[in-house]
Amino acid sequence: MKVRVAVNGFGTIGKRVADAVARQPDLELVGVTKTRPSFEARRAREKGYPLYLAGGGKRSEFESAGLTLAGTAEELFAKVDVVVDAAPDKVGRENRALYEKAGVRAVFQGGEKAEVAEASFNALGNFEVCRGKRFVRVVSCNTTGLARAAAVLAPAWGIGHWEATLVRRGADPAESKKGPINGILPTFQLPSHHGPDVRTIFPDLSIATTAVVVPTTLMHVHVNHVRLSRAPADAAAVLNAFRRTPRFHVFAPWEHADGTPQVMEYARDRGIGFNDMMENVVWEAGVRLEERDLYFFQAIHQESIVVPENIDAIRAMFDLAPDAKSSIATTDRALGLAVH
């Protein structure tokens, strides 16, 4: 019997998670919610997803737009086993009371503080920790990228200390009211919050992060310096470890993917989902090893990297897979990603 899923919020993350749920063999998408009519609400109906009224939304606005509602969010929650909360940042904390009242489990996003859930989640990092939990938080896009890399490096060579500078995109492509338009903005929280967030997955990891915001919408880029506990044989050993791991994509120099524009052009050519790049992107030319000091760049597509993590979080919560590897393979196969 399939686990019945609701997606509360049908925006940048919610619409991607809804599509991902609908493709899984062991999950059933029961409905999605919106607070007001929009092109995304119309797309939900065009895809055949039952649409429910959320928050303080007005039914009359949907009726005026010609969008039929299947009911209220509370009525949707009564029909499902789990809700993926894809509401705007900080709203998920308020929504938890709704899920508790409905007696359903919930997956929150990284825009919420860790305290909203029983555990934070990363499929490669701590799948087993989240098995059977009622409330789980999928960590943010940047934290997901760092946690995936830690899950590769730590078991193989150990991590003494990690320094990362995050070059963050200024806005998602659809966000026309955010910036900067012209400028590089330092994040004056030193170190930034991303390191402590990674430690919600790897509590003992020594990591410090800083961040700047730049005028692009495509991706984030991480500049990493990792002091490993044991020296790999060479940089090729590190690259091979990334290549062997699910949800990593390594570009060779001959592919001429010189930066994020080419990476996203590759994603468009590949045509997965919303032309998304759900993997950590590593450049072969951007990995250097000096004894135990590893330097590497990685790029993170902020709109999509957490999508498969939401699916695996549900499997962990409902004990649907024997282990993380099996869950990741099922998810990735359904999404059209490479299966390792």
Image (cartoon, grey):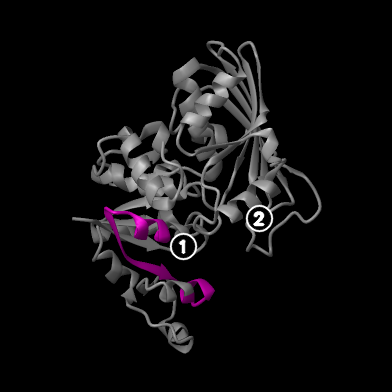
Q: In which quarter of the image is the N terminus?
A: bottom left
Label 2 environment density (alpha carbons within 10 Å; few <14, some 14–19, many ≥20): many
The alpha-carbon separation of the residues under discs 1 and 2 comes to 18 Å
Q: Give the range drawn in magenta.
A: 18-42
Farthest residue, direction left: 1
In this picture, residue 169 sits left or right of residue 22: right
Image coordinates of residue 332 in percent, x first then y, are 41, 46
Instruction: List the residue tagged with mark 2.
Output: 171
- Quadrant of the rendered image containing residue 51: bottom left
Q: Which residue is drawn at the image coordinates 29% and 68% (left, top)?
A: 76
Q: Which residue is drawn at the image coordinates 55% and 14% (left, top)?
A: 232
Q: In which quarter of the image is the C terminus?
A: top left
In this rendering, the count of numbered labels is 2
* Image vertical order of residue 303 relative to residue 66, above or below: above
Q: Earlier in the sequence, mark 1 or mark 2?
A: 1
Farthest residue, direction right: 182
Q: What residue type is labelled 2?
A: Ala
Instruction: List the residue tagged with mark 1.
Output: 15
Mark seen at residue 106: none
Residue toward you, 33 or 43: 43
- Per the image, label 1 sits on a secondary structure element best described as helix
Q: Is residue 109 visible?
A: no
Q: What residue type is labelled 1?
A: Lys
Farthest residue, direction front: 254
> Magenta stretch: residue 119 in it?
no
Residue toward you, 133 or 337: 337
Image coordinates of residue 197 in percent, x first then y, are 50, 36
Q: Can residue 196 be seen in this view?
A: yes
- Per the image, label 2 sits on a secondary structure element best described as loop
Image coordinates of residue 141 in percent, x first then y, are 53, 44
In this picture, residue 168 sits left or right of residue 271: right
Image coordinates of residue 283 in percent, x first then y, are 64, 34
